[in-house]
Image (cartoon, rainbow, N blue to C red):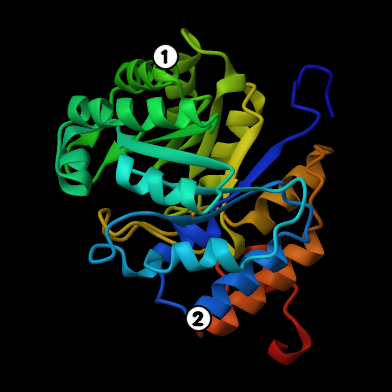
Amino acid sequence: MSQHIKLPKSVNIVEVGPRDGLQNEATLPLEVKVALIDQLSKTGLTHIESGAFVSESKIPQMANSREVFATITRQHPVIYSALTPNVRGLESALDCGVDQVAVFTAASEGFCQRNINCSISQSLERFEDVIELASKHNLPVRGYLSCIIDCPYDGATDPKQVADIAQVMLDMGCYEVSLGDTVGTGTPLKVAHVLEAVFSTTSPSHIAAHFHDTYGQALANLYQALLMGVSTIDSSVAGLGGCPYAKGAAGNVATEDVLYLCQGLGISTGVDLAKVTQTAWMICQQLNKQPTSKVSLATPPVSFQ
């Protein structure tokens, strides 16, 4: 690697497949979700987003999150986290012994209104009680910020808007903000513009990349983020997911593809690529679909060859 190219020596992978991935797939029985998380727990991953305490009527795929947390076999030092959009959700998460929680908003008013039925400022106000209660229980809070490139309703997002909201979330108590290219329209140049704005006020150590692969640009965008100092990447086994509020959006970048990229760049992840690929095929068999991951498709199990 050229001396002029600076890349992180190691990258932290946050596996979001069991939550962000499965909430946009067919509803699966409890035992399958548990098997997925248990299998991922043995791959070297250290953070698995395992459920969400949200409205069961709106997101039925997450309706059994309480049972999931009660049934999984926890492995040290894996962090098992959950999405908790409000205090009620946080209280349920606390009852289940989650290790971390996450809150979310968007960088566009249109997406915020259609996703969580409030303005951006109102969504941030809702976080205050969640973060305060989590702090009392010494529970770390992660923040998700959607539509950092484009919004399906409002169009292009102003990078300064992204930077401002990310800083507010950090100031409120989020230890990290995950920047989401929710509709997957980003390109490396667009990502660079957003990160330049964000890093004018925030350290890369507090920022994660959460890129969807709708237009096949997620890996290129991640490489750009890595070059700019980002060292935490959200990804989804088998490329599961999408977004119910962004029509046509593909799933998150596949964990296997991210691992292959990092492996080729000499970046340590601590995660076993072969085991993640096996897990990808397992969950896709249960969903009766093929992975979207190029790595998994290139190395199918014997039964699929």
Task: Calculate the distance from the C-alpha at mark 1 to the C-alpha at mark 2.
Answer: 40 Å
Which residue is under mark 1?
171
Q: In this view, does 121 lie above or below 110?
A: above
The residue depicted at 69 percent of the width and 62 percent of the height is 40
> Residue 276: image x %, image y %?
72, 63
Q: Provide the secondary structure element on which disc 2 rests.
A: helix
- Against 142, residue 175 (above or below) is above
**Image quarter for residue 302?**
bottom right
Residue 214 marker = none
Circle 2: residue type: Leu
Q: Which mark is residue 287?
A: 2
Q: Upstream in the sequence, badge 1 or badge 2? A: 1
From this viewpoint, which residue is outermost toward the bottom?
303
CB within 8 Å, label 1 to label 2: no
Q: In which quarter of the image is the N terminus?
A: top right
Query: Residue 156 location in percent, x, y?
Result: 26, 33
Q: Which residue is drawn at 39% across and 43% down?
A: 90
Which quarter of the figure has residue 54? bottom left
Q: Which of 277 and 139 is in front in this view?
A: 139
Q: Which residue is drawn at 48% across and 41% down?
A: 101
On the rendered structure, is 102 left or right of 225?
left
Placement of the C terminus among the 4 image quadrants: bottom right
Query: Is label 1 in a helix, a strand or a loop?
Result: helix
Q: Can residue 153 be seen in this view?
A: yes
